[in-house]
Image (spheres, rainbow, N blue to C red):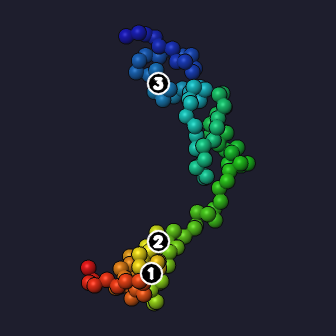
Amino acid sequence: DFLPLKCDACGEAFCKDHIRYDDHRCSSAYKKNVQVPVCPLCNAPVPVQKGEIPDIVVGAHMDKDCKYNPAQQKQRIFTNKCLKPGCKRKEMMKVVCEQCGGNFCIKHRHPLDHECKGSSHPTSKA
């Protein structure tokens, strides 16, 4: 063992089992931490300068610069309405018929399932 080991953040001496910042709950770890915190509201990275406490910087970002829009969180995912008359289903992604170009739900995606009026009709229900 090379004892004692000196913590490069707080300057205290530790054994090999406690030299990591988390292992000795280093109060100065934020000075050496090079991770970029992310805003929990808008998911944007928040730059932190050396010597700044990340929690305080992220808090200031949330108070001033945050682009979080609560209305945006409630946007509907299922916006692609089926064009088959009487069907009210909506899909997350467009399901376009190759023959008529219409947008349909998974159940009515095949030409025979939506009485396709496209250029050619299929010969079987496969």
Image point (68%, 50%), residue name: 66
Q: Is residue 87 visible?
A: no
Q: Amino acid at mark 3?
A: Arg
Viewer-proximal residue among 89 and 119: 119
- Closer to us: mark 3 or mark 1? 1
Location of the N terminus by quadrant is: top left
Q: Amino acid at mark 1?
A: Cys
Q: Residue furthest right?
A: 64
Image point (67%, 53%), residue name: 67
Which of the marked residues, 2 or 1, is nearer the chain's N terminus? 2
The span from disc 3 to disc 2 (Cα, nearest Å) is 51 Å
Label 2 sits on residue: 94
- Label 2: how many Cα within 10 Å (few below 14, some 14–19, many 20+): some
Location of the C terminus by quadrant is: bottom left
Image point (41%, 83%), residue name: 119
Up the image or down, 98 lies above or below 24; here it is below
User: Could you say whether the residue bearing mark 2 is in a helix, strand or loop?
Assistant: loop
Up the image or down, 58 lies above or below 102; here it is above
Which of the marked residues, 3 or 2, is nearer the chain's N terminus? 3
The span from disc 2 to disc 1 (Cα, nearest Å) is 14 Å
Label 1 sits on residue: 100
- Label 3: how many Cα within 10 Å (few below 14, some 14–19, many 20+): some
Label 3 sits on residue: 20
Do tag 3 and tag 1 residues touch (Cβ < 8 Å)?
A: no
Residue 44 picture location, percent across and down = 60, 47
Which of the marked residues, 3 or 1, is nearer the chain's N terminus? 3
Viewer-proximal residue among 29 and 66: 66
Do tag 3 and tag 2 residues touch (Cβ < 8 Å)?
A: no
Residue 111 picture location, percent across and down = 37, 82
Q: Which mark is residue 70?
A: none
